Image (tube, rainbow, N blue to C red):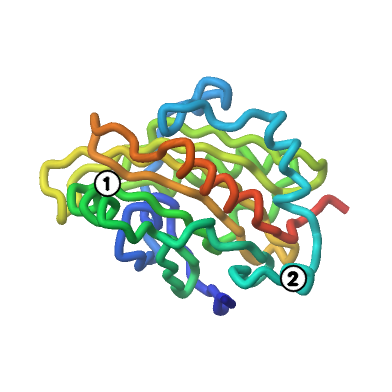
Amino acid sequence: MRTSSFPGSAPLAALIAVIALLPAPVAVPAAVSEPALPAGRLRLFDAPIPGDARREGTHLAAYGLAPPAERTHPETFTGRGFTGRAPPGAHWKPDIGRSYLAYTMETPDAIERAERGQSFVIMVTLTDAAYARGTTADSFPTAFETETRRTTRGRFRLVDIAATPRATAGNRCVDYAVRMEERDDPDLPGAELVIETRGVACLEASSTFIVNAFYSERRPKGAPTMVDATLREQGEMFLRNLIVHPKRAR
């Protein structure tokens, strides 16, 4: 599967929340003032986010510079500046848009949950790189957090965010975890929703776009997570299998 040219861009919250997967650019959003939590304190899907040791251990698998020709698996996909593999299992439905490739679960249970406002998506998307072009490897995580706050607006509220550098020095790459709340979805009147996201983002070598890959759950507030150990590992495997050509220090 080959992705197309991916010219578009959309905020993280909009990409996650639109189940029809039709992201659109937004105008200048309102800032959010909540402070970031240290990575060690933030839990997603009722479990801690992966620690530094795990990121170090998977770094070469996630961001080795093997050319696309070396990836011959039939489920391999290729886009501008990255290659990867579809998440394991036959229950994933791919959806390709102008600026994203998404996988949603196509099982009776997942379809029933989606009707109640609970869904899970695995996605890779290209987003605007303007905020990151002047960054260094050390300042990129802060810039990513600031941009996420800046572009979280309207019916979305940023609760927690933690972004940390990838292991290899010089890359503009981060691991991140985000928790948001959503209200006033027109399809779910009165519902309060929680969005939890774990992903990686890199400024691509050309400095023209950010490659952002993540897995995310959206669910009614108070509802138990549907992300068990198996589903979480499928999301982590998707992130580990992603190969990005990141902007490096000269």
Residue extending farthest to the top is 41
Q: Which mark is residue 61?
A: none
Total count of labels: 2
Assign a secondary structure to mark 2.
helix
Residue nearer the viewer, 46 or 7? 46
Residue underneath mark 1: 118
Lower sequence index among marks 1 and 2: 2
Residue 80, percent across and down?
65, 71
Please tell me whether residue 9 is drawn above or below residue 240 in the rendered image.
Answer: below
Q: Amino acid at mark 1?
A: Gln
Q: Residues within 10 Å of mark 2 (few under 14, many from 20)?
A: some
Q: Residues within 10 Å of mark 1 (few under 14, many from 20)?
A: many
Residue underneath mark 2: 68
Q: Is residue 101 left or right of residue 184?
A: right
Which residue corresponds to the image point at 64% horizontal and 28% vertical from the top-left? 51
Residues at discs 1 and 2 in contact (Cβ within 8 Å): no
Residue 66, percent across and down?
80, 63
Residue nearer the viewer, 160 or 229? 229
- Quadrant of the drawing holding the N terminus: bottom right
Residue 105, percent across and down?
37, 57
Residue 96, percent across and down?
46, 72
Which image quadrant for residue 53?
top right
Which residue corresponds to the image point at 39% horizontal and 59% vertical from the top-left? 104
Q: Amino acid at mark 2?
A: Pro
Assign a secondary structure to mark 1.
loop
Which residue corresponds to the image point at 15% horizontal and 55% vertical from the top-left? 186
